[in-house]
Image (cartoon, rainbow, N blue to C red):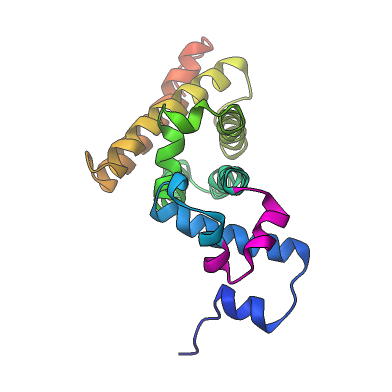
Amino acid sequence: MPRQESAHDISRGRRLSPGARRDQILAAARTLFAERPFTSVTTADVAEAAGVARSLVHHYFGGIRDVFLAVVAQGGAALADVRSAGPETPLDERMRHNVVAGLDVVGANRETWLALAGHGEVLADPDVRGLVQMASERNVQRTLEVMSDVIDDTPSARFALRCFNAFATEATRAWLTGERTRQETEALLVATLRSLLLDAIPALEGKKHL
């Protein structure tokens, strides 16, 4: 099997566009943040992992906090975008696919996600808090889009989905910290989402059971 090209190989082998170089640095940083808390990662660590000069990390992002913010913003988008199964997919299969896909993204970024799901120093940062809130709203919007044949975009639906996000955060934290298994977490989230879509939201809106 051919050897997979590393970030270091890429940086040495050819010049990258600014966008590609930025993505390369973010990919390296995301791996580091998935392995340990971001407060223990330095720009020198990111530069070494990306195979670039430390000055280049500072050129694109500034300090390590700015790198972390960029990774958080990218991760929030990925968490919503990966839930790709929509009305063309049968409901039960769709819910399971989207829940599993979301948990896969979280699992690949464990330390970053745990830092954001906590209530400590990281969330005291107003910029981080803003990104977390933006990610939550993006997830609500994505759910409304992929479930457009089941629920309408109403204040009640958005309220219920924001509550589900908080519920899902706690369930996911229990999995990542070893309190519950991945299988249990998937089952709980799928069952709860199904009940929310078919029972709770219609009840909030005064509708009959679908």
Q: Is residue 115 above or below residue 119?
A: below
Where's residue 205, x and y in %? 54, 12
Residue 103 in view (yes/no): no
Q: Is residue 98 above or below residue 192?
A: below
Q: Look at 51% across and 61% down and name the residue there.
A: 45
Magenta stretch, main secondary structure class: helix
Depth check: 133 or 52 in front?
A: 52
Quadrant location, the N terminus = bottom left
Residue 5 falls inside the magenta stretch: no
* Front residue of this view, candidates 93 and 34: 34
Residue drawn at x 42%, y 33% as measured from the top left: 117
**What is the magenta range?**
47-63
Q: Position of residue 91 (x, y in %)?
A: 47, 41
Q: How many marks?
A: 0
61 with respect to 6 (left or right):
right
Residue at image location 43% in from the left, 53% down from the top: 34
Residue found 49% across the figure and 86% down from its top: 3
> In the picture provided, is 171 more to the left or to the right than 66?
left
The quarter of the displayed image where residue 159 is located = top right
Choose between 178 and 16: the one closer to the eye. Answer: 16
The x and y percentages for residue 22 are 69, 60
**Image quadrant where residue 8 sits:** bottom right
Kindly tell me whether residue 90 is visible in this rendering: yes
| 124 is higher (above) or lower (below) than 69 | above
Q: Position of residue 175 (x, y in %)?
A: 29, 42
Residue found at the very far top of the displayed protein: 206
Q: Residue furthest bottom?
A: 1
Image vertical order of residue 66 relative to residue 53, above or below: above
